[in-house]
Image (cartoon, coloured by chain):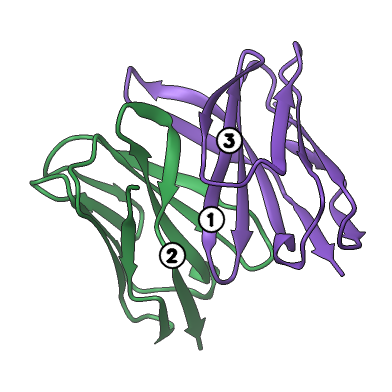
Chain colours: A green, B purple
């Protein structure tokens, strides 16, 4: 079945440092979504990317979709303690837009 | 709008028992998906219901089943529980955000199931 790999699994940064997580698929994706899950919480939708090479920004978060639509990244500038959580990418299975395959997630820890 | 609600929030069961979890989606959302989340396997898709019909299914054994009612509320059932079924079960209601490609999923708080 479809697999979506994410790296790194875990990253620990000092507040103010930047953070990036990468998502890779072996197949071309129709779109990719990003979710954030706070410790003890549930995944919350952040954004969706659809177009090849698309870049979207949400305040300190920058999301990119690769030209080949096989990879994506989430970059956080100047992390804050409120950024702590696990970030997941998710992609629909071929032919079934509502069935999402989630990446393995990147857990971000931010310390002062 | 009220968010996705799931009941119960916590459950402890014994091996061999069965369990039923409930999910009420956001009003107006007709698609409900279920996921199992464990530290080892991450978030895994169980199944999706749309207008009372199972539209998609993941790779889980037949012990895992579900259904959806006419008001879009959904239940999932796990029979003959095993220790490995201990997990956070998340329900998500979906709305299409880009035709025909994408559904934005709104997750509920989950049901934490512990099997002893």
Does residue B112 appear left or right of residue A98 in this picture?
Answer: right
Viewer-proximal residue among A14 and A51: A51
Badges 2 and 1: C-beta atoms under 8 Å apart? yes
The residue under the point 51% across, 45% down is B59
Residue most extreme to the left: A67
Does residue B32 appear left or right of residue B6 in this picture?
Answer: left
Q: Position of residue A107 (x, y in %)?
A: 47, 73
The residue under the point 86% across, 62% down is B15
Residue B36, compared with residue A110, is above or below; it is: above
Check disc 3 and report the residue beneath it. Answer: B47
Q: Chain of mark 3?
A: B
Q: Are marks 2 and 1 in one subunit?
A: no
Q: Quadrant of residue A18?
A: bottom left
Callout 3 environment at 10 Å: few (<14), some (14 to 19), or many (20+)? Answer: many
Check disc 1 and report the residue beneath it. Answer: B43
Q: Are marks 1 and 3 in one subunit?
A: yes
Does residue A84 appear left or right of residue B79 in this picture?
Answer: left
Does residue A70 appear left or right of residue B2 in this picture?
Answer: left
Q: Distance between the Cα atoms at labels 1 and 3?
A: 12 Å
Q: Chain of mark 1?
A: B
Q: Tell us which disc is closer to us: 1 or 3.
A: 3
Q: Chain of mark 2?
A: A
Viewer-proximal residue among A111 and B90: B90
Residue B76, compared with residue A77, is above or below; it is: above
Local SS, label 3: strand
Callout 2 environment at 10 Å: few (<14), some (14 to 19), or many (20+)? Answer: many
Q: Distance between the Cα atoms at labels 2 and 1?
A: 9 Å
Q: Distance between the Cα atoms at labels 2 and 3?
A: 21 Å
């Amino acid at each position: 079945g479809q697999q979506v790999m994410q790296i790194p699994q875990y990253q620990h940064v000092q507040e103010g440092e930047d953070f990036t997580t990468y998502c890779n698929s072996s197949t071309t994706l129709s779109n990719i979504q990003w979710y954030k899950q706070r410790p003890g919480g549930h995944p919350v939708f952040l954004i969706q990317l659809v177009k090849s090479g698309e870049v979207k920004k949400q305040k300190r978060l920058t999301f990119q979709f690769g030209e080949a639509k096989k990879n994506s990244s989430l970059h956080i500038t100047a992390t804050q303690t409120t950024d702590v959580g696990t970030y997941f990418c998710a992609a629909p299975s071929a032919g079934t837009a509502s069935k999402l395959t989630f990446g393995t997630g990147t857990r971000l820890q931010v310390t002062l | 709008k009220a968010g996705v609600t799931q009941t119960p929030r916590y459950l402890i069961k014994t091996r061999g028992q069965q369990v039923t979890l409930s999910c009420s989606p956001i009003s107006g959302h007709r698609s409900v998906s279920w996921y199992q989340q464990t530290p080892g396997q991450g978030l895994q898709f169980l199944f999706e219901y749309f207008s009372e019909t199972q539209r998609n299914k993941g790779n889980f054994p037949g012990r895992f089943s579900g259904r959806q009612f006419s008001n879009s509320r959904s239940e999932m059932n796990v029979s003959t529980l095993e220790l490995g079924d201990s997990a956070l079960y998340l329900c998500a209601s979906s709305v299409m955000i880009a035709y025909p490609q994408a559904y934005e999923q709104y997750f509920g708080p989950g049901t934490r199931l512990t099997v002893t």
